[in-house]
Image (spheres, helix red, strand yellow):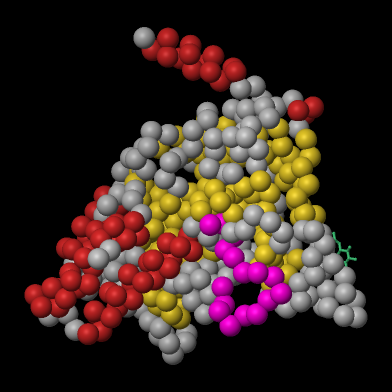
Amino acid sequence: MLSVVLFWGLVALGQSRPTKDGDIKDVEFRMPNVQPQKPDTYLCVPMKMEEIAKYVVGFVPHANMSTAHHMLLYGCEEPGQTDKVWNCGEMSMKEKSSYTMAPVCQKGSAIIYAWAMDAPQLTLPKDVGFKVGGNSEIQWLVLQVHYKDVSNFVPPKSGSDHSGITMKVTETEQPKRAGVYLLGTDGRLDPHETVYMEAACKITEDFVMHPFAFRTHAHTHGQVNAGYRVREGQWTEVGRQTPKKPQMFYNTTDPDLTVREGDYLAARCTMTNDEDRTVYVGPTQNDEMCNFYIMYYVTGDKILRNNYCFSSGPPRWYWSNIGALNYQAAPKSASMLPGSDKLLVETMSHYDKYADPEYRELDSMDDQLLVDELLGRNGDFEDEDEEDEDEEGYGDEEEQDYDREYKTLLKLYEELNSL
Ligand SMILES: *[C@@H]1O[C@H](CO)[C@@H](O)[C@H](O)[C@H]1NC(C)=O
Ligand SMILES: *[C@@H]1O[C@H](CO)[C@@H](O)[C@H](O)[C@H]1NC(C)=O
């Protein structure tokens, strides 16, 4: 029986031969001579994928070093807009722009390539491709360019820019398919505190994932983001980087590390808030974000169905909420900058204070978006809040916090689908 399975396995693999160079075509994806007028403008341009599936196996950046701060390539199910160029910056309501504003993606979003000056280049491993078009989730690609300095585009220079990417694309099915798994949190940073924002989910699909690159994302308070595989309570680093460096894809710590069904993926962002105000997770530069992206490949055509792992973050959710994580075994280096042995200690540990059984039950739902769970409760939410107050004597502050959290989770959920 086993030999039959193996035989078919080999046949199936044999059908998707590695690409011959002749099959690979260059597809240009550029900004159409844009003229951003304000510093820190983020512009997006869409490209529709075809009905026949293709594989992106390489990227060559053509960025205008003098003006482009970074470029990101997103796969979307639906783009923020379907024509021309739009402003897709991290939103700031006050901002006026000559371009219409829209999110990067309306639905289904994954970053598949990133470029920044001085950052290492991402090369996909051999025989690995991002499947686009056909029956894949990536029906559109969206190129985002961040123009930090716009002096070339305003008078007197009045120049324009066509930064972008040449994609190496083939119709030949690749033996290995790439995906991106995203961990993140909601939550808040109290004034003058160092806080751990943590997320973890169990992999419940029958795959062997090979993580090969990771990316961190945070705003100004982020010190270090670290990701781990937890197998039977043993922690192994996937990657660790400070978000103060260019937020590009970096090689994982161990290229041979694999993740399989029953393992957990976990991430921590260590944040320091030196301000006098409470900072919440949210989309603008005044808010904070904690994200850890894992780029992986699987052998064959199927990637994970669920590529998101979100928690409600501090002060409610910590690794300690999931017993199976054995959080005491988490490496101390999770909160150390790469190349440093200085531990960034959490100012006030909320682990015990917020060990409320209700949250535990909610938050330990493995491999589920907590956001979905909260959204699913919808109308009942306020009633429950009031009950809590009656039965457990929650003060006004907690109640507001709870309410606020529901709202930010909604916002976050929308942003996730658009980011
Ligand atoms: C880069 O910017 C300069 C100055 O605006 C312009 O002349 C040049 O064409 C740009 N290059 C690209 C690739 O857009
Ligand atoms: C990342 O890994 C690839 C493949 O192993 C290797 O070719 C490349 O040099 C590495 N990049 C860096 C910056 O270490």
The answer to whether residue 347 is above or below residue 374 is below
Work out whether residue 146 can be spotted: yes
From the top left corner, tell me how far across and down residue 418 is, in percent. 53, 60
The answer to whether residue 193 is above or below residue 33 is below
From the top left corner, tell me how far across and down residue 118 is, in percent. 73, 62
Work out whether residue 220 can be spotted: no
Residue depicted at 38% across the width and 66% down the height: 410
Residue depicted at 66% across the width and 46% down the height: 48
Query: Would you identify the image quadrant in which residue 144 lies?
Result: bottom right
**Quadrant of the snapshot with the N terminus:** top left
The stretch in magenta equals 91-106
Query: Would you identify the image quadrant in which residue 412 lies?
Result: bottom left
Q: Is residue 175 magenta?
A: no
From the top left corner, tell me how far across and down residue 231 is, in percent. 35, 43
Q: Is residue 97 magenta?
A: yes
From the top left corner, tell me how far across and down residue 344 is, in percent. 44, 72
Pick out the residue farthest to the front: 83
Residue depicted at 53% across the width and 42% down the height: 137
Q: Is residue 147 left or right of residue 80?
A: right
